[in-house]
Image (tube, helix red, strand yellow):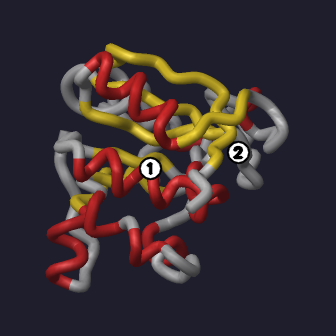
Amino acid sequence: MEESIIRVIDIVPGTSVDGPGLRTSIYVAGCRHRCAGCHNPQTWDFSQGVEMTVSDIMEVIEENGFNVTLTGGDPLYSLPAITPLVIAVAKAGYTIWLYTGFTYSRLLELPGIEKILPYIEAIVDGPFEADKRDASLHFRGSSNQRIIDVKKSLASGEVVTFEY
């Protein structure tokens, strides 16, 4: 079976801004949300970055031993490609946070999302809204964004958030 290829802008090990503790943040190329005031507009272009296999990325993750954050860009625009990575990361024992410009209700409609949700600890959802920017918020840029506890949300059928 051919290994999934993911276009990656950057991998940053040891960051503490994309979730609790030290994490390895993987910046996936491509985003169509194009939020005004986006912190990472260089990640919007789907052709930027380098192509990496799941094995390549797992090697970096395991070398550093930190939990993982998928960000970008918007990783959910590359859902078929990131699915094997999410499963591999979870099976290796790491927690996963995922940042997306999709709201939780909208991402539930994405074909294939059900394959990764059980493996994700938290989703930071919603587009960045410059008029709601709040530098005092932990792990998110604007007050409309939520840190969703995915397991509890799936179990209850309602959005359950983490408070940070």
In the image, is 84 to the left or to the right of 20?
right
In the image, is 101 to the left or to the right of 60?
right
**Residue 49 horizontal/vertical position (percent):** 74, 28
31 and 7: which one is in front? 7
Provide the residue designation for mark 2. Answer: 35
- Name the amino acid, label 1: Leu
- Secondary structure under badge 1? helix
- Secondary structure under badge 2? loop
Vertical comparison of 102 with 94: above or below: below
Residue, far front: 1
Which residue appears at 40% of the width and 77% of the height?
Answer: 114
17 and 1: which one is in front? 1
Vertical comparison of 151 with 14: above or below: below
> Badge 2 local density, few (<14 within 10 Å), some, or many (20+)?
some
In the image, is 149 to the left or to the right of 40?
left
> Badge 1 local density, few (<14 within 10 Å), some, or many (20+)?
many
Which numbered mark, 2 or 1, is in the foreground of this view? 1
Provide the residue designation for mark 1. Answer: 85
**Residue 115 horizontal/vertical position (percent):** 40, 73
**Residue 135 horizontal/vertical position (percent):** 42, 25
Which residue appears at 63% of the width and 44% of the height?
Answer: 6
